[in-house]
Amino acid sequence: MVRDLRICCVGDSFVAGVGDTRCLGWVGRLGVSAHAAGYAPTLYNLGVRGQTSTDIQIRWLGECERRLPAGSDARVVLSFGVNDTSWDGGGPRVDPEVSQEALTRMLAHAADRDWRVLMVAPPPVDDVAHNERTADLDERFAEICARAAVPYVRVHRALRESALWMREVAEGDGAHPGARGYDLLAELIAPHWREWLSAE
């Protein structure tokens, strides 16, 4: 009997796959790879463009509870942070400490419901100062996930060092890559995704 595997992928425009001409994003690509590996997940893309950690914290629990019923193999993928660190009115849209608090609460709520979580780091954009702020948040998120025993996929630095990613972002809207960039992001996440899926 095939297990009732349900996965909510919650986050921002990168989760939604903005800029991808194939309309898959990294979430869709990993969903395809899951089916190829013999899994049959019900995959929900809950990415919303422009949202910060505090925006996501408000909506995520209700959205996931509707989609992750008791008795299912219920899982959540989280990814956000780039909008938190964007500059707005003399400072980041969300203070790093507030972003940390939002993630900490989300992981605690997931643990209370026995939802297995995977967290993907925020990727870089075509702005050096913005990326420095995001890199700091990346470190903070990694520490929180380590304390909560939640796997955290470190993609930020690898993508900053990728000529392909940075070129596609620069040629696009300054934030989002095209299809090849999402191919690369999915490839970076894939080993962690496979290990996470295999855990019973």
Image (cartoon, helix red, strand yellow):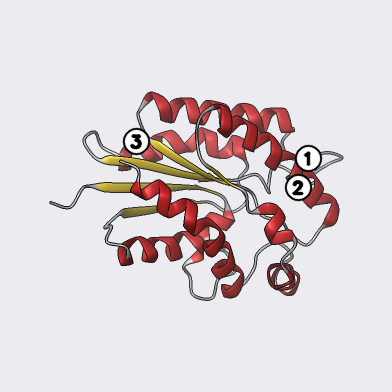
The three-letter amino acid code for the residue at tag 1 is Pro
Q: Are dots 1 and 3 in contact, CB under 8 Å?
A: no
Q: Where is residue 24 in the image (x, y as percent from the top left)?
A: 46, 67
Which residue matches tag 3?
65
Q: How many circles with numbers are drawn on the protein?
A: 3
Which residue matches tag 2?
86
Which residue matches tag 1?
92
Find the distance from the CA under tag 2 to the CA under tag 1: 5 Å
Q: Where is residue 45 in the image (x, y as percent from the top left)?
A: 43, 54
Find the distance from the CA under tag 1 to the CA under tag 3: 30 Å
Query: Residue at the location (73% across, 75% down)?
Result: 171
Furthest-left residue in this view? 1
Camera-side residue: 176 or 143? 143
The three-letter amino acid code for the residue at tag 2 is Ser
- Give the quarter of the figure containing the C terminus: top left
**In the structure shown, which secondary structural element does the residue marked by tag 1 occupy?**
loop
Counting other residues with Cα less than 10 Å from the Cα at mark 2, is it few (<14), some (14-19), or many (20 or more)? Answer: some
Q: Quarter of the image holding residue 40?
A: bottom left
Q: Are dots 2 and 1 in contact, CB under 8 Å?
A: yes
Find the distance from the CA under tag 3 to the CA under tag 2: 30 Å
